[in-house]
Image (tube, helix red, strand yellow):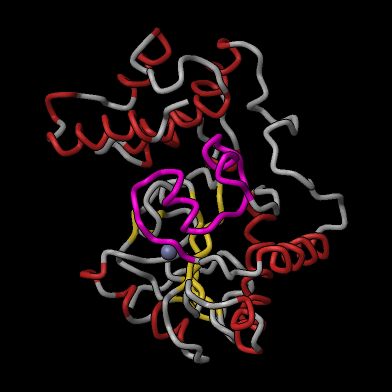
Amino acid sequence: MATFTPDSSLVTSTSLSPNRTVTNGRYARVVVLHTMETDEHSTVAEAIGGGWFMNPTAMASAHYNVDNDSIVQGVPEKDMAWTAPGTNEDGIQIEQAGRAGQTADQWADPYSSAMLDNTARLVADICHRNGIPPVKLTDEQLAAGHMGIIDHGQASRVYRLSDHWDVGPGFPWVGFMAKVRHYYDGGNPAAAPTVSSTSSNDWFDMATKADLENAVFNTPRSEWGGRTLTEMLQDNNRDTYSTLRMVRHLFNLFRIGIPGVLTDGALGWKLRSIFGYDESKMGKARKDEFENDKRNQFRW
Ligand SMILES: [Zn+2]
């Protein structure tokens, strides 16, 4: 069985899932929490991560599977897990033992408390390594492209590509985020951001289209393996529209260009040609999906 080096030192075992999209590196924006809809046992992470998600017919996977005493990594963070449509491209997916229907009391039982502690440590670690602020996003923030922590239910509401509602209304977000923040601060004494924000002064905070073009086409970055954004995205995905969607999403995020209308203007044209956009090669289904996304995901 294929193995790989886990991304986090918290991982207790790995089970490399075939249900993933391999990339050479990608931009992780959100950490997405799920429930596995299982009973509470100490072998749930191993059973799901090493069982169902190893089955090609499942067509599903997660980066991490967590129970009360273990964290099983099934997909390397650089690859896309097939978990929550709308966030598969730029999300790191965590499946937790338990059910979306759990009440607050059930989330507070000893088993869930131990598991949530495991998850909180893992989320803090993921946030550190990926530059994701340890904050819970609102639906509005998710839709606006902020970085942070969400659940599957939010991805369903915002992107409307799934009807899953995990982790459910009983999930103890306040206490959980306090734990995440605790571990995040413990790993790094420097002040962490207290709100999700694109206002931190990173490279995306640019005033002009020329700046953005320079960043997109000409600026190699270490987190993309010394490649430019364009090169990284080209390597990621040459065959589907997901790359274009990702790029357009970035443009939406930073409000430069014309949101949802990359076809307009020289920048959009150049991106489309660079990414091999070719109407004649695309099946009708892909076109429909693309048009649907344009209508549904990128309204503003
Ligand atoms: Zn889910």
Where does residue 205 sit, x and y in percent of width and height? Answer: 67, 24
Splitting the image into 4 quarters, where does residue 147 fall? top right
Against 258, is 149 above or below?
A: below
Where does residue 225 sit, x and y in percent of width and height? Answer: 53, 42
Where does residue 230 sit, x and y in percent of width and height? Answer: 44, 28
Image quadrant of ligand 1 equals: bottom left
Q: Nearer the viewer, residue 18 or 263?
A: 263
Against 50, is 88 above or below?
A: above
Q: Which residue is painted at 53% across and 69% down in the image?
A: 6
Which quadrant would the N terminus be assigned to in this image? Answer: bottom left
Task: Decide whether residue 157 is among the magenta residues.
Answer: yes
> Where are the magenta residues, as a range?
137-166
Q: Nearer the viewer, residue 170 or 99?
A: 170
Where does residue 171 sit, x and y in percent of width and height? Answer: 59, 69
Q: Nearer the viewer, residue 39 or 186?
A: 39
Q: Is residue 233 left or right of residue 171?
A: left
Q: How many marks?
A: 0
Q: Is residue 276 left or right of residue 130?
A: left
Against 289, is 205 above or below?
A: above
Task: Decide whether residue 230 is among the magenta residues.
Answer: no
Q: Which residue is painted at 42% across and 35% down in the image?
A: 246
Against 109, is 215 above or below?
A: above
Q: Which residue is painted at 35% across and 57% down in the image?
A: 163
